[in-house]
């Protein structure tokens, strides 16, 4: 970690992302609370989160741009567009304006995979392979650690000043992120300069995932897991709060508790990957998530709190291991298309599962839904734990930090 933090470009990226992730964490949960309070409907909340997952299906269309244009500049433009978009939430003034929250959420969900894919390629290009796990761990740990304060801060600002104030804070953090990216002096390398062939260019990312056996297995397991995890998002999650007798604002408390667990998971992520490998750590993470969801099925405040901690501890190593193995097994000039293909691959079942959850919450006991996730995720985790780790595909080395 010390070696990673000595890299000036990565320090700037981490600083900007910390600010941006704070704003996003604060706003993301506020959107659900806002819709819940304006409509009084758990299904409306489920629809909101479904719509936030759905646009990422189109992410491969942007993946070509990520691989053909300077990634840092593309990230700056994305930050500026998202800052302008969230400011539209200042116009929400009652139930009749709920559509505006949905519209901004869609734009938000389109920008995030573009930025994330460009960021993954930028990190892979400026750091040596042995530092990738530490770099991904630092960013993911910070993202999860912000759950400790950002959601509570967002909920507090929402209660005191309204959702528009939270949107304004988020816009400022996007601008701050753009500023740190402007200050970076990291060469943008290995961009795709091949002739643009429409079908081949837009599908190369998904074809790469399919051609690489370990990525094919890992993505297949995650898609299967998402079919169950997605059901628990949105409507079912707010139904869980109803079941334990807590108000919608309590989502901030659970996110804070999960953030505490995520700090612990982030601290050991690089260490675990160095000793067990990315695939096994991914499997352990999936199984741990299943255990956390299973604890929620008990429907008591203590069990839900413990479940949130378990989810936090296991989520960060899972995310770090997944991002690292994709970076390692993907050529630099294909990083954008690979990560946007993953966004599309995961978002379609997530959106469908969220929509299904909004329906099932009215007819199925939520304990059955949480226990189903427990069984499936533990089984899928077992498949990955038994798999040997891959040999890293050869990719070009990083450019030295000019600072």
Image (cartoon, rainbow, N blue to C red):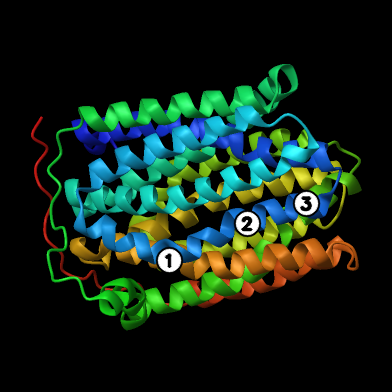
Instruction: Look at 87% across and 51% down and name the residue there.
Output: 299
Residue beneath disc 3: 44
Q: Mark 1 vs mark 3: give the one in front.
A: 3
Instruction: Look at 36% across and 30% down and name the residue there.
Output: 177
From mark 2 to mark 3, how far is it between C-alphas?
Answer: 11 Å
**First-in-chain label (1 vs 3):** 3
Q: Is residue 149 visible?
A: no
Q: Indicate the position of residue 269 as horizontal and vertical percent values.
A: 43, 49
Q: Indicate the position of residue 182 as horizontal and vertical percent values.
A: 23, 30
Q: Secondary structure at mark 2?
A: helix
Instruction: Look at 20% across and 61% down and name the residue there.
Output: 332
2 and 1 marks in contact (CB < 8 Å): no
Q: Which mark is residue 342?
A: 1
In the displayed structure, would residue 183 be above or below residue 320? above
In the displayed structure, would residue 294 be above or below residue 127? below
Q: Which mark is residue 259?
A: none
User: In front here: 397 or 193?
Assistant: 193
Q: Indicate the position of residue 218 as horizontal and vertical percent values.
A: 45, 73
173 displayed left or right of 212:
right
Q: Quadrant of residue 157?
A: top right
Instruction: Look at 32% across and 40% down and name the residue there.
Output: 77
Answer few, some or many: residues within 10 Å of disc 3's Cα (few below 14, many 20 plus, some between 14 and 19).
some
1 and 3 marks in contact (CB < 8 Å): no
Q: Which mark is residue 51?
A: 2
Q: Mark 2 vs mark 1: give the one in front.
A: 2
User: In front here: 76 or 205?
Assistant: 76
**First-in-chain label (2 vs 1):** 2
- Quarter of the image for the N terminus: give it: top left
From mark 2 to mark 1, how far is it between C-alphas?
Answer: 18 Å
334 displayed left or right of 26:
left
């Amino acid at each position: 970690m010390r070696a990673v933090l000595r890299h000036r470009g990565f320090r700037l990226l981490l600083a900007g992302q910390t600010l941006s992730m704070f704003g996003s964490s604060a706003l993301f949960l506020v959107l659900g609370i806002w819709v819940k309070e304006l409509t009084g409907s758990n299904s409306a909340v489920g629809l909101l989160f479904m719509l936030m997952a759905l646009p990422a299906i189109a992410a491969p269309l942007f993946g070509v741009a990520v691989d053909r244009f300077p990634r840092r500049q593309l990230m700056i433009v994305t930050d500026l567009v998202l800052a302008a978009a969230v400011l539209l939430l200042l116009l929400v003034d009652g139930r009749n304006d709920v559509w505006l929250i949905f519209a901004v959420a869609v734009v938000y969900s389109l920008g995030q995979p573009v930025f994330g894919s460009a960021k993954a390629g930028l990190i892979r290009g400026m750091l040596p392979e042995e530092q990738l796990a530490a770099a991904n761990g630092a960013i993911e740990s910070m993202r999860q650690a912000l759950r400790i304060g950002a959601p509570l801060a967002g909920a507090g600002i929402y209660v005191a000043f309204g959702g528009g104030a939270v949107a304004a804070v988020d816009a400022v953090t996007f601008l701050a992120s753009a500023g740190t990216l402007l200050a970076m002096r990291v060469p943008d390398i290995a961009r795709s300069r091949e002739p643009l062939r429409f079908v081949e260019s837009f599908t190369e990312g998904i074809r790469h995932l399919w051609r690489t056996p370990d990525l094919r297995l890992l993505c297949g397991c995650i898609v299967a897991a998402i079919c169950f995890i997605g059901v628990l998002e949105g409507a079912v999650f707010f139904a869980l709060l109803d079941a334990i007798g807590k108000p919608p604002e309590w989502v901030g408390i659970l996110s804070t508790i999960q953030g505490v667990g995520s700090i612990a998971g982030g601290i050991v992520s690089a260490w675990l990957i160095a000793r067990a490998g990315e695939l096994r750590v991914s499997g352990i993470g999936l199984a741990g998530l299943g255990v956390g969801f299973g604890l929620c099925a008990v429907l008591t405040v203590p069990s839900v709190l413990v479940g949130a901690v378990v989810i936090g501890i296991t989520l960060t190593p899972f995310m770090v291991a997944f991002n690292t193995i994709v970076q390692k097994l993907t050529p630099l000039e294909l990083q954008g298309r690979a990560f946007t293909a993953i966004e599309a691959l995961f978002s379609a079942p997530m959106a469908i599962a969220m929509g299904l959850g909004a329906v099932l919450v009215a007819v199925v006991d939520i304990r059955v839904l949480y226990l189903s996730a427990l069984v499936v995720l533990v089984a899928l985790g077992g498949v990955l734990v038994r798999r040997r780790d891959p040999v890293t595909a050869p990719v070009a080395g990083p450019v030295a930090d000019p600072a």
